[in-house]
């Protein structure tokens, strides 16, 4: 898709996305997530210690809820308590329960540390995928990890798998399109983004999708050597 077709797509895409912005509550969201979202507001509103304490309780009450595990590690990172988060997941590992959640949690802790921790995080995510291959979040996190480490080629396969497992997930769709864009697979990226025109997506997803689309439609991009 080039020339006039690309410009037309860009125009339709930008206008349609401008009409979106309503946050969706996914069907699988259940007990604890409402309180978890409130705890996240504490983290962002200058009360991180209180937010962390709430997540430390919520992760015990809802140990299988991946969003709560992820936000718990986020809270631990913001309050300098990643060692406590690691200790929680190691204790869970010792119990023999939920090994895939353990690997996911340890991956989040390693990723939050950055540096050499990124490779450890990738190893934990690969193990989580081995244990629970039909869990899209594990594939998504592995792909995102590679993408943030400027490894778009490696990110492509796990991001594609995450979207195949959960095609209605707008966040997965945008990040996969971003990887394709970085690989200069613009037509594929546009095809991945196109279903968002028919979805009601959050303002955050709209912003990220428009960022990817703007890079694809940048008239100077084709003149840049690959």
Image (cartoon, rainbow, N blue to C red):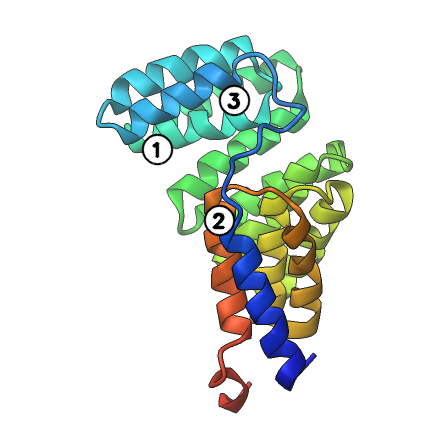
Residue at which label 2 appears? 118
Marks 2/3: CA distance? 17 Å
Q: Nearer the viewer, mark 1 or mark 3?
A: 1
Q: Is residue 137 left or right of residue 69?
A: right
Marks 2/1: CA distance? 15 Å
Please identify the quarter of the rendering in which residue 55 is found.
top left
Could you say which disc has been placed on residue 36 in the image? none
Please identify the quarter of the rendering in which residue 36 is found.
top left
Q: Classify mark 1: helix, strand or loop.
A: helix
Q: Give the residue displayed 46% in from the left and 44% down from the top.
A: 203
Q: Is residue 79 left or right of residue 62?
A: left
Which is nearer the eye, 29 or 74? 29
Marks 1/3: CA distance? 15 Å
- Residues at discs 2 and 3 in contact (Cβ within 8 Å): no
Q: Nearer the viewer, mark 2 or mark 1?
A: 1
Residue at which label 3 appears? 89
If the image is split into quadrants, where does the N terminus sit?
bottom right
Q: Give the residue displayed 55% in from the left and 85% down from the top.
A: 226
> Going from the N terminus, do you reach mark 2 or mark 3 first?
3
Q: Position of residue 64 (x, y in %)?
A: 62, 19
């Amino acid at each position: 898709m080039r020339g006039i077709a690309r410009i037309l797509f860009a125009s339709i895409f930008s206008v349609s996305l401008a009409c979106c912005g309503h946050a969706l509550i996914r069907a699988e969201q259940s007990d604890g997530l409402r309180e978890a979202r409130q705890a996240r507001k504490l983290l962002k509103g200058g009360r991180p210690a209180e937010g962390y304490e709430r997540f430390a309780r919520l992760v015990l009450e809802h140990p299988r809820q991946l969003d709560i595990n992820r936000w718990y590690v986020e809270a631990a990172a913001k309050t300098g308590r990643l060692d406590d988060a690691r200790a929680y997941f190691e204790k869970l590992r010792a119990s023999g329960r939920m090994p895939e959640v353990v690997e996911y949690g340890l991956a989040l802790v390693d990723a939050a540390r950055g540096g050499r921790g990124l490779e450890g995080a990738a190893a934990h995510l690969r193990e989580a995928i081995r244990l629970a291959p039909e869990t899209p979040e594990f594939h998504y996190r592995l792909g995102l990890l590679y993408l943030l480490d400027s490894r778009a080629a490696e990110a492509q396969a796990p991001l594609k798998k995450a979207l195949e497992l959960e095609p209605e997930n707008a966040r997965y769709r945008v990040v996969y399109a971003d990887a394709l864009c970085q690989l200069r697979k613009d037509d594929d990226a546009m095809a991945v983004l196109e279903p968002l025109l028919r979805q009601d997506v959050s303002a955050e997803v709209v912003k990220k999708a428009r960022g990817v689309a703007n890079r694809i439609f940048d008239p100077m991009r084709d003149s840049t050597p690959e």
